[in-house]
Amino acid sequence: MKRRKFIGLSAAGIAGTASAVPTVFHAGTPEEKTQEPITERELNPNTLWLRDAKWGFFTHYLPHNPSDKIPDHMTGDLWTKKVNSFNVKRFGQQLSELNTPYFFITIGQKRGWYCSPNKAFEELFAQDVGRLTERDLVQELAEELVPRGIRMCVYLPNFGRHATPEEQLMYQQVIREWSDRWGKSISAWWIDGGVFDGTDRHKEYTDAYRSGNPDALVSYNTGPIGMTRDLKKPATEYEDYIAGETNWHLPVSGFRPWDKKEYYLGPNISGDQLHFLTFMGDFWGMGKEPRFNDELAIGWNKHIAKYGGTISWDVPLTDSGLITDPYMRQLDLLSKSLANH
């Protein structure tokens, strides 16, 4: 395996104003635009914790099924009731029992439906476009998990590339409010819909995500891996790790025999830390039990870790924010297996 070096990245500031809420991208949204050309980069040294983790916990905690429409019966009161029922203390105990290195939660997916308040969103996009909770679930989770040695991370969709520059700048103000409030308690952002026209927009967004913590990692998802034989490239030079959305194809690491090129041999993939995100259940945030048997889940994770990569496992939670027994059992086996790997 080739030797990789590390180098850091910097951050700057933005601001702006405009009008209505454009479409927000989310998991499952196809993006067909060619990405900006990426030159070979050295890894940001801040990604080392992600590589060392080998695995992590991710969940879609939403008022709807991921990538689906808001249910007709959903109201702000029902969403608030669900978020208020999240048992942060017990969930933290479960993650500690699993020796979980890091945890990602969805701030929201459909515009305006978020598990955290945001004054900038209310002022710039009007409160009646959706529902923001009074409870800051992200903040409470960070206060519970970070002292336990579990890194807190968040998921958020970008506005679509068809939004105006003014709308993009407005949304960045929303992001900055969250980032500044949570500060250094947030270790990473996983951003859906990471396709823009040109490099400036990626830089603006990255600066916004890092506003509260310059060392936070950022990744932009541009669609699932495994649809072609080609290696998934970074979305931009202004990100730190491969988003690695993996649905029905499980990527592997190795050398391609026809051109002798490395294929997902980490840790460095054109400047991004090797990382994959897949669902442990039937789909994102769904399923009564794991879709893979123990040997497959553990074996694939060990294979990726062997070549410098990390896998984030999306696991459904109950409305009260708890992991059910079938997932606790498999995650416990996976955690213990990787600790000895």
Image (cartoon, rainbow, N blue to C red):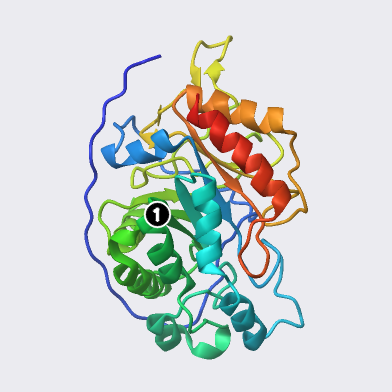
Pick the quarter of the image with the N terminus. top left
Q: How many circles with numbers are drawn on the protein?
A: 1
Q: Residue at x 71, y 51 (%)?
A: 325
Residue located beneath label 1 in the image: 148
Q: Nearer the viewer, residue 134 or 128?
A: 134
Give the left or right position of residue 300, taking residue 242 as reference.
right
Residue 245 appears in the picture as rendered: yes
**Crowding near the residue tagged with mark 1, few <14, some 14–19, many ≥20 C-alpha atoms within 10 Å:** some
Residue 195 appears in the picture as rendered: no
* Image quadrant assignment for residue 62: bottom right
Give the left or right position of residue 154, taking residue 277 as reference.
left
Q: The residue tagged with tag 1: helix, strand or loop?
A: helix
Q: Residue at x 59, y 56 (%)?
A: 59
Q: Position of residue 228 (x, y in %)?
A: 64, 31
* Image quadrant assignment for residue 178: bottom left
Up the image or down, 108 lies above or below 303; here it is below
Up the image or down, 232 lies above or below 179; here it is above
Amino acid under label 1?
A: Arg
Q: Position of residue 165 (x, y in %)?
A: 39, 69
Q: Residue at x 35, y 34 (%)?
A: 271
Up the image or down, 263 lies above or below 315; here it is above
Q: Residue at x 71, y 81 (%)?
A: 74
Q: Position of residue 198 (x, y in %)?
A: 38, 52
